[in-house]
């Protein structure tokens, strides 16, 4: 079945607990469930993956090269967004389109969050929209 992989990076396992005023009250589990159903209603499988480890995120990105079921990727790389050239290169190396998502508006926060090193290798970016950013990214991939 045509599958979209959603990758959430470090500390996103703490959604619901960590700074709810910034990241919202949904847990990662609730967010993932909602996105799986959103995709299913449109006839697609949504697979959700979270890791606090850079290498595991890179391995997951690489796995899309081998498994032909993957048609697109949505990534919230957490703080890796701002400095991981390794994740940037992995996104560039894979062949499926990748969309960058952030729950918060990284432009309107601390200075260090304003730079995303992955933007230039992603098809699009949604930020500051909470879970709707992931839904907009899904819509874009399914277009
Ligand atoms: C985040 C923004 C990052 O700056 C931060 O490190 C995160 C989450 C977001 O979804 O708003 O962990 O990617």
Image (spheres, rainbow, N blue to C red):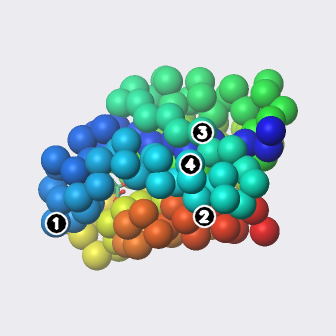
Up-down relation of residue 47 to residue 135 (above or below): above
In the depicted view, which residue is nearer to us: 114 or 77?
77
- Mark 1 sits on what residue? 21
Q: Left or right: 94 with respect to 113?
A: right
In the depicted view, which residue is nearer to us: 6 or 75?
6
- Quote the CA–CA distance across marks 2 and 4: 13 Å
The quarter in which the C terminus is drawn is bottom right
> Is the residue marked by circle 4 packed among few (<14), some (14-19), or many (20+) residues within 10 Å?
some
Residue 64 visible, this orientation: yes
- Quote the CA–CA distance across marks 3 and 1: 27 Å
- Quote the CA–CA distance across marks 1 and 4: 24 Å
> Is the residue marked by circle 2 packed among few (<14), some (14-19), or many (20+) residues within 10 Å?
many
For disc 1, does the CB lie below 8 Å from ligand 1? no
Residue at screen point 60% across, 64% down: 137
Mark seen at residue 137: 2
In the depicted view, which residue is nearer to us: 127 or 114?
127
- Position of residue 100 measured from the top left corner of the image (x, y, whole percent): 54, 58
Tag 3–tag 1 contact (CB < 8 Å): no
Q: Dot 4 lies on which element? A: helix
Q: Earlier in the sequence, mark 2 or mark 1?
A: 1
Tag 3–tag 4 contact (CB < 8 Å): no
Up-down relation of residue 72 to residue 64 (above or below): below
Which residue of the protein is positioned furthest toward the bottom in this rendering? 108
Q: Earlier in the sequence, mark 3 or mark 1?
A: 1
């Amino acid at each position: 079945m045509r599958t979209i992989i959603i990758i959430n990076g470090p500390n996103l396992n703490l959604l619901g607990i960590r700074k709810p005023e910034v990241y919202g009250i949904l847990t990662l589990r609730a967010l993932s469930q909602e996105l799986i159903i959103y995709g299913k209603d449109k006839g697609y499988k949504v697979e959700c993956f979270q890791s606090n480890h850079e290498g595991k995120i890179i391995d997951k990105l690489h796995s899309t090269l081998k498994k032909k079921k993957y048609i697109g990727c949505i990534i919230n790389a957490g703080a890796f967004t701002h400095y991981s050239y390794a994740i940037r290169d992995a996104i560039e190396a894979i062949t499926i389109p990748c969309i960058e998502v952030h729950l918060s508006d990284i432009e309107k926060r601390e200075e260090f969050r304003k730079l995303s090193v992955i933007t230039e290798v992603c098809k699009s970016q949604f930020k500051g929209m909470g879970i709707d950013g992931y839904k907009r990214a899904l819509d874009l991939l399914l277009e």
